[in-house]
Image (cartoon, helix red, strand yellow):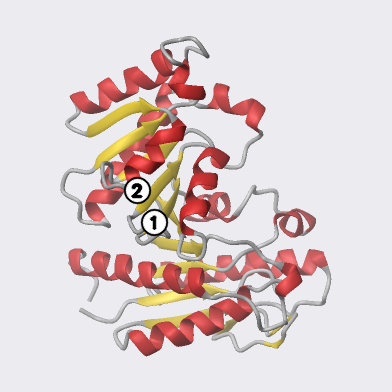
């Protein structure tokens, strides 16, 4: 089996992406002689000249240009993967207003990658194999970047079923967990306490759990948000499906900031990213922590190597 090759986009040139990417890549290659990395991005950033292996258009210092080169980096990286020149992708943070300024109306990189790859169903999976508490924490966000007022209508039986199936298969194939135990986190306080605080748990969540269990999956719940993540940290569940962004991310970042990784499920290739943003206030100061980017690289290499081992055409 050949070495896994990972494309790394530098993200918004005004942020800490170029710095943490270069530092993390150096650490990764010191650890893994069995990995290769291709940096993709503009030839100059807020911190000075960059050294990408594959360069985008130059960045002219404006927000619009920052959005343009951020998207172009991702497009070039996907082309590298499609051409067989890379096996996975790690993306440094982008700035959503910059994407919009450049005419790209995607809520984030996950949605952009879904469109570029033509994927039908994707999932935003937050993974920390080690946390401040010690245990692993893995959370799939059933809905991502939508207003809180829209969540109840968006969390349907169809969505929860599709997202949990996607998670189940990903845990089996990427994490090699033969029979994953997956918990569904409820939507309402105390998982509605038998209908006292809403009916979504009984009307939406419970039928989904029953359906998935009838398919042979070890799906459980719905459980209250104030206990389910602690139980996952204790090893009771392999992963949790969270109904909306902040209920999952608040728990995730509290337990694992700096070691967490965002994994996009459902793409035809591996994609990971660090769990932080652009941090414009730290850019160019040499103070940014590359820990999460390094974890994203490590996981991308591991998942890509797993795919190469199981793909008879990987070479």
Q: Is residue 14 visible?
A: no
Q: Kindly identify the residue that appears in the image at 57 percent across and 77 percent down.
A: 20
Viewer-side residue, 86 vs 45: 45
Question: In screen coordinates, is 300 left or right of 192?
Answer: left
Total marks shown come to: 2
Q: Which residue is mark 1?
A: 133
Q: Kindly identify the residue that appears in the image at 55 percent across and 71 percent down.
A: 76
Nearer to us: label 1 or label 2: 1
* Residue 73 pos. (x, y %): 60, 70
- As helix, strand or loop, the secondary structure at mark 1 comes to loop
Q: Which residue is mark 2?
A: 233
Q: Residues within 10 Å of mark 1 (few under 14, many from 20)?
A: few
The quadrant holding residue 224 is: top left
Question: In screen coordinates, is 130 left or right of 111?
Answer: left
Viewer-side residue, 107 vs 104: 107
* Residue 170 pos. (x, y %): 30, 50
Of the numbered discs 1 and 2, the one sitting upstream in the chain is 1
The quadrant holding residue 83 is: bottom left
Q: Kindly identify the residue that appears in the image at 75 percent across and 80 percent down.
A: 46
Tags 1 and 2 in contact by the CB under 8 Å rule? yes
């Amino acid at each position: 089996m050949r070495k896994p090759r990972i494309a790394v986009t530098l993200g918004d040139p005004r942020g800490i992406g170029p710095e943490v990417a270069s530092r993390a890549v150096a650490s990764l290659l010191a650890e893994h002689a069995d990995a290769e990395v291709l940096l993709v991005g503009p030839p100059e950033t807020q911190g000075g000249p960059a050294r990408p292996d594959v360069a985008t258009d130059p960045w002219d210092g404006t927000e619009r240009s920052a959005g343009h080169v951020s998207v172009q980096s991702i497009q070039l990286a996907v082309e590298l993967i499609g051409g067989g020149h890379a096996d996975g992708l790690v993306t440094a943070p982008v700035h959503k207003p910059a994407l919009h300024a450049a005419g790209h109306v995607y809520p984030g990189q996950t949605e952009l990658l879904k469109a570029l790859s033509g994927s039908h169903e994707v999932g935003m999976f937050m993974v920390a194999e080690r946390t401040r508490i010690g245990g692993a924490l893995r959370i799939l966000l059933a809905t991502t970047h939508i207003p809180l007022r829209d969540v109840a209508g968006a969390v349907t039986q169809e969505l929860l079923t599709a997202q949990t199936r996607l998670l189940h298969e990903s845990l089996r194939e990427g994490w090699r967990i033969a029979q994953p135990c997956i918990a569904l986190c409820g939507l309402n306080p105390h998982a509605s306490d038998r209908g006292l605080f809403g009916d979504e748990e009984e009307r939406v969540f419970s039928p989904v759990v029953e359906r998935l269990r009838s398919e042979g999956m070890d799906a459980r719940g719905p459980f209250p948000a104030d206990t389910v993540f602690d139980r996952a940290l204790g090893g009771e569940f392999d992963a949790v499906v969270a109904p909306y962004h902040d209920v999952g991310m608040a728990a995730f970042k509290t337990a694992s900031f700096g070691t967490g990784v965002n994994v996009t499920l459902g793409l035809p290739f591996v994609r990971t990213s660090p769990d932080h943003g652009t941090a414009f206030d730290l850019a160019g100061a040499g103070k940014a922590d590359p820990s999460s980017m390094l974890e994203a690289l490590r996981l991308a290499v591991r998942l890509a190597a797993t795919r190469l081992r199981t793909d008879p055409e990987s070479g």
